[in-house]
Image (tube, grey):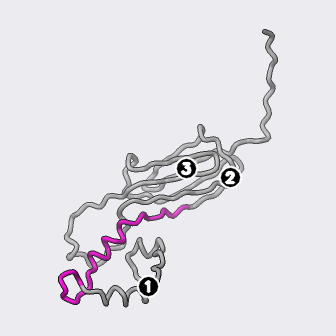
Amino acid sequence: MAKEKRSFFERLTGSVRMDEAEEVESKPTKKGSGATDVAAWIDQETEQEGELTVDVYQTPEMIIIKSMIAGVRPEDLDISITRDMVTIRGRREEEKIARDDDYFARELYWGSFSRSISLPEEIDVDESEAIEKHGLLILKLPKLDKKRQSKLKVKTA
């Protein structure tokens, strides 16, 4: 039976669907003790890339994208934009302060993440800007004014 891809929320929180929980509980550890090998299962999940959550809206002049990137250093972000798409990639590094056995809950997402957003209108790539404020990434993407006209003067050669 093909395994379904886990949702972002499931990867983010480490939660398991009930039908998957039964599968995981029945798998013995590599040592053969019959106990669940949760650490190996978590390691498999952390190899997958997380997907950022975003808010995307428009004003008459621009498209705005907001995303929470708390805990990510600006140098660990890669934002690529074209006239009709934005891709945000990054990595949130975890500080190893406590041993895995000492955790009561682990709900924070650590590791690589990305998100590609198709834009509803073309934007001016050169005038776009990215701002980080208190862990909130704000992308301001000015719309191209397709109705804008300019007069050209004819030069004599």
Residue 59, placed above or below residue 97? above
Name the spot of residue 17 as percent of width and height, x first. 44, 85
Q: Quadrant location of residue 109? A: bottom left
Who comes first in sequence, dot 2 or dot 3?
Answer: 2
Mark linked to residue 139: 3
Residue found 60% across the figure and 51% down from its top? 85
**46 inside magenta stretch:** yes
Residue found 57% across the figure and 61% down from its top? 55
Helix, strand or loop for disc 1: loop
Residue type beneath disc 2: Thr
Q: Quadrant location of residue 157? A: top right
Helix, strand or loop for disc 2: loop
Query: Would residue 80 appear left or right of 27 to someone viewing this image?
Result: right
Mark linked to residue 9: none
Name the spot of residue 107 as percent of width and height, x first. 36, 73
Q: Nearer the viewer, residue 114 or 107?
A: 114
Farthest-out residue, front: 1
Magenta stretch bounds: 29-54
Name the spot of residue 32 as percent of width and height, x first. 19, 86
Name the spot of residue 151 as percent of width and height, x first. 81, 26
Question: Would you call the spot at circle 3 few (<14 residues within 10 Å), some (14-19), or many (20 or more)?
Answer: many
Residue found 20% across the figure and 76% down from its top? 101
- The residues bearing labels 2 and 1 have C-alpha atoms spaced at a distance of 40 Å
**138 inside magenta stretch:** no
Residue type beneath disc 1: Arg
Question: Would you call the spot at circle 2 few (<14 residues within 10 Å), some (14-19), or many (20 or more)?
Answer: few
Query: Would residue 146 appear left or right of 21 to someone viewing this image?
Result: right
Q: Which residue is mark 2?
A: 59
Q: Nearer the viewer, mark 3 or mark 1?
A: 1
Q: Which residue is mark 1?
A: 17
